[in-house]
Amino acid sequence: MASVPAPEVLRAPLVVEFPFTRSLGPVQSAFLTGLRERTVLGVKTRDGRTLVPPVEYDPVTAEEIRDLVEVAATGTVTTWAWNHEPRRGQPLGTPFAWVLVELDGADTALLHALDAPGPDAVRTGMRVRIRWAAERVGAITDIACFEPYDGARDERRPEPHTGEFDEPVTGIVAAARLDYTYSPGRAQSAYIHALSERKTVGERCPSCRKVYVPPRGACPTCGVATAERVEVGPRGTVTTYCIVNIKAKNAMNDAIEVPYVYAHIALDGADLALHARIAGIPCDEVRMGLRVEPVWTDGGRYPDHYRPTGEPDADYDTYKELV
């Protein structure tokens, strides 16, 4: 009997991105608004230390601190590392040094980029100054980077500052992003290849006999490897669901208007529910036990959504273990 070649194990770039909005307390608000105005603020502790960037609580005593002071835009490199290949979203598009800079008047160091021609031009103890961004909005990126500076240390004591500015910044959008290459492995590669043929294939545990979709290559209950492939569905039962009222900011969901329903669906023959969108029915008519079937689009690599089949609802006892 001729052997069946193993399916190609897939690899693809994957981006996980979650921009979120955070509010600022009075200290961080003053710090970021100050950067917009080309002013660097720190905060004074009870024992006389000046912390830059400022924090609202003393990291040593946990005491609340609010006494703002202005420090210089010049400073000294305390340590550094060369970045030979800048990535998306980093301060500079050409190779640069990450540096910790103790600004004149501060007792702690600020992390940022140093624009230098090469690692030989960077050293601990070198003098630097802030290069301000041409357009400033009240963010750490208002400091475009640091640049080498020949001037002496500014010995003036930090001046007290009220922290008051016109139109203070009260919130920022922080973008968290992770870029990496994902390989789904043998079991999920086979699952994805089957989807391209409009089939849904899981794997059966040799011990408990449960069929898992999508497969992971091992039974999560018994801990043993799975290899027997089982085609399930295509119809299934809604086990639970939610109504989505906030539009997601990504290309996949740009064409989907809210509200819509996202559900866990137990495909016939599967012992694990997968999630998918429900369409073809008003949101308020979706319910547990609803029988559904996949809807494919031309060229689609997976079902675009599931729609009601018109069958009677499934009895709760038939899917209660999958809720």
Image: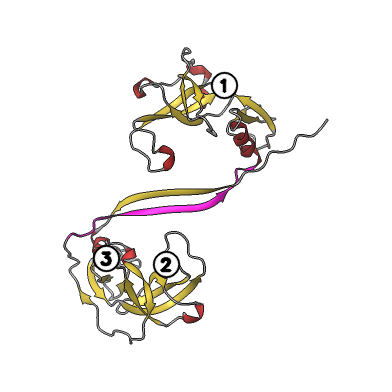
The circle on residue 92 is 2
In this view, the residue farthest toward the top is 312
Assess whether mark 3 and mark 2 are in contact (beta carbons under 8 angstroms): no
Q: Secondary structure at mark 1?
A: loop
Residue 38 drawn at (x, y percent) = 25, 71
Residue that mark 3 sits on: 31
Front residue of 192 and 154: 192
Of labels 2 and 3, earlier in sequence is: 3
Magenta segment, which residues? 167-185
Of labels 1 and 2, earlier in sequence is: 2
Question: Any magenta on residue 171?
Answer: yes
Question: What amino acid type should be assigned to the residue bearing mark 1?
Answer: Asp
Residue 227 drawn at (x, y percent) = 69, 34
Q: Secondary structure at mark 3?
A: helix
Residue that mark 1 sits on: 268
| Quarter occupied by the N terminus | top right
Q: Main secondary structure of the magenta part?
A: strand
The residue positioned 26% from the left and 72% from the top of the image is: 46
The residue positioned 41% from the left and 78% from the top of the image is: 77
The circle on residue 36 is none
Residue 116 drawn at (x, y percent) = 44, 76
